[in-house]
Image: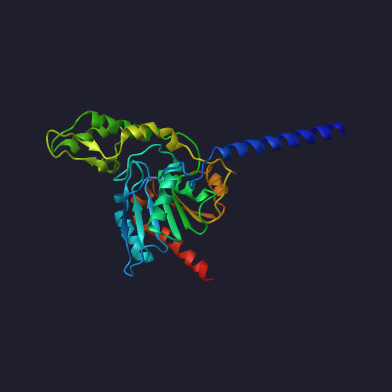
Amino acid sequence: MLQNASAIRNSHLVMKCAFLISLSRRRNYTSLINASVKPADLEYTEIIPSDGNKTQGALVLVHGLLGFKRNWSSLSKAFSRDLGRPVYAVDMRNHGLSPHAEPMDYLHMAADILHFIKKLGLSDISLLGHSMGGKAAMTLALDSDLPPGLLKNLVIVDISPTKGKVSKTTISYIEAMRRIEASNLTGSSARKEADKLLVDVEKDPSTRAFLLSTLTTPSSDSESARFRVPLDILSRSIPDIGSFPYDPGEAIYKGRTLLVKGGKGRFVNNDNIPVFQRFFPNSRLEVLDTGHWVHAERPNEFKNVVVNFIKSSETTAET
């Protein structure tokens, strides 16, 4: 009896400690709606369907690290055509034409997206995020203060809601881009010289072209090539980009969710798929024969998977 009573007390103590730890973690998390979180005004492109609808059932596309809205140009048109909906592609903070701002953590990036959605008055959103953009989209969906009914579909592309380090490959890209800027390349050959400097860290020419897509070509010999992304901010933000605001069990999003995995990629695997499912219990998984840039490597297959998923929500609503 004494042993049983002691075991019960110990069990209650363990449960109390676990509760206090969980409570402490939640107290450290600030809602996206909190006044202390200052969102940035994101630049965007829009594709509006022929019926003129600009808000209802909009699809919002969020790029990954070192990307920008133009990466989604062709797919934006295809999505709008096949879905008959408005499609918006945003530049995340510190990318493209959007403001350079710190901190660059997922709380602030998610707040940026929410601010964008509210500013344009979008409703019944389908939110699609790739890689870093996927983590920002998940952070938005998991926020307990998210306005009800705002999100109708969530699509996450080749990323998991886990905490870890940014890959050495990605860090090497940023370091190589900083070396390019330090080289002060000028003239019409600047882009070609920059490509040569990237070969040491990336052999694939298509990936190098992606990395150089934000390089501005000098208009005169007095100017040197510069990237549109603030590499100093990105370098300082590496720990935040690898992190995630929640631990499993701290938050759940019960809405319709699609996880699209690149079959050859490493960011979504057998270890973290169950973690994803704990956060998003109403989710399904689709695997395409690609690496990490799923939408760029197999755009038609990717488009069909996303379109079918979004259209299936219309069928469910009708029944």
Where 135 sits versus 21, above or below?
below
Residue 266 at x, y percent in the picture: 44, 41
Quadrant in the rendering for residue 230: top left
Left of 44 or right of it: where is 271?
right
Where 158 sits versus 315, above or below?
above
Write the residue at 17% across / 36% down.
190
Colour option used: rainbow
Write the residue at 45% across / 33% down.
165
Question: Which quadrant is home to the N terminus?
Answer: top right
Residue 58 at x, y percent in the picture: 40, 60
- Judging depth in this view, the residue of 162 and 289 nearest the camera is 162
Farthest residue, direction front: 35
Residue 121 at x, y percent in the picture: 40, 59
Residue 89 at x, y percent in the picture: 34, 53
Where 316 sits versus 1, above or below?
below
Farthest residue, direction left: 221
Write the residue at 32% across / 49% down.
43
Whether residue 265 appears in this view of the structure is no
Question: Which quadrant is home to the C terminus?
Answer: bottom right
Left of 253 or right of it: where is 188?
left
- Judging depth in this view, the residue of 100 and 276 nearest the camera is 100
Whether residue 226 appears in this view of the structure is yes
Left of 233 or right of it: where is 272?
right
Total marks shown come to 0
Quadrant in the rendering for residue 213: top left
Farthest residue, direction right: 1
